[in-house]
Amino acid sequence: MSFDTCGIIGKSSALQEVFRILAKVAPSDSTVLVTGESGTGKELLVRALHRNSGRADKPFVPINCGAIPRELLESELFGHEKGAFTHAIRTKIGRFEMANGGTVFLDEIGEMDLSLQVKILRVLQEREFERVGGGKTIKADVRVVAATNRDLEEEVRKGTFREDLFYRLNVIPITLPPLRDRGGDVLVLAHHFLKHFCANRRQCILEMADDAREILARYSWPGNVRELENFMERMSILCDSDHIGIVDLPDKILRETGVEVPKRPLPVIDTCFRWPELQDLRDQQLGLKEFLDQVE
């Protein structure tokens, strides 16, 4: 049976090792903790885990624990009964009930309040919970997968994350490597995204000049795959020629990779003169007289 990567792209040894672990873990019901920097694609990885599990035909229910206010998160996870609190005008089922038989993905688990961590621990230990304001115990037939960009062991030492919950979650730890540690995957992904965005815009696929490819491969991509994807979308829209060259790359990328920022002619619209910003002149090492000479 082939492993479905859910569209995760890459050929690097670091990513292939992640796939190897994922393929062994997916058929089990063990709890998994995925760690990795923001933008590395943790949710996509967890979707691949669910897709290749015995629960694949049941719901996959994600929830970002850092995106929902603390006072609402408990209700989102476990549901609530009518009248449980102000504005609870009807009974609501939570994510654990929605995912019955499937997988609950607790994204950014490190942002969860300590008081709620206790209730997650109970689900993992006892496989049961109650809705907010309810007395009926509900069985939780779900696989729990969590993800974080924090060092949870450090959070345990600081007292902001429960040690017992950490060990319950960390049965199978998987670390998703940052893009800078994935070697040639940068250019593989860059070409994939560029092809995708150009096709969406029904335009010819842009090529990347060799010097631009070299620079993109050397850049650290602190925002990881998400940053690269956004950058290639921007290039597909703003690039004025049929290829991406050094002149098209942002100054930030050029400076970090040790490349001299090229002088670019300032755009001047025939029907509307624009005085330059001082930062524009500084970036391009132009004096005001040189700028006015260009305008003329």
Image (spheres, rainbow, N blue to C red):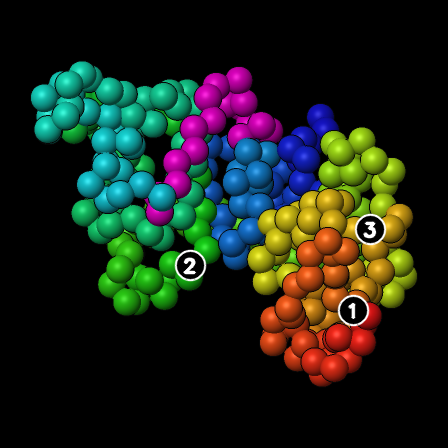
Q: Which residue is mark 1?
A: 295
Q: Amino acid at mark 3?
A: Asp
Which corner quadrant of the image does residue 209 belong to?
Answer: bottom right
- Residue located at (78% from left, 69% from top): 295
Q: Which residues are magenta?
A: 49-66
Q: Amino acid at mark 2?
A: Arg
Q: Which residue is mark 2?
A: 150
Q: Is residue 281 above or below residue 71?
A: below
Q: Position of residue 162 (x, y in %)?
A: 26, 54
Q: Position of residue 189 (x, y in %)?
A: 74, 48
Q: Residues within 10 Å of mark 2 (few under 14, many from 20)?
A: some
Q: Is residue 112 above or below residue 73?
A: below
Viewer-closest of 210 and 77: 210
Is 31 on the left-hand or right-hand side of 42? left
Q: Amino acid at mark 1?
A: Val
Q: Residues within 10 Å of mark 1 (few under 14, many from 20)?
A: some
Q: Which residue is mark 3?
A: 240
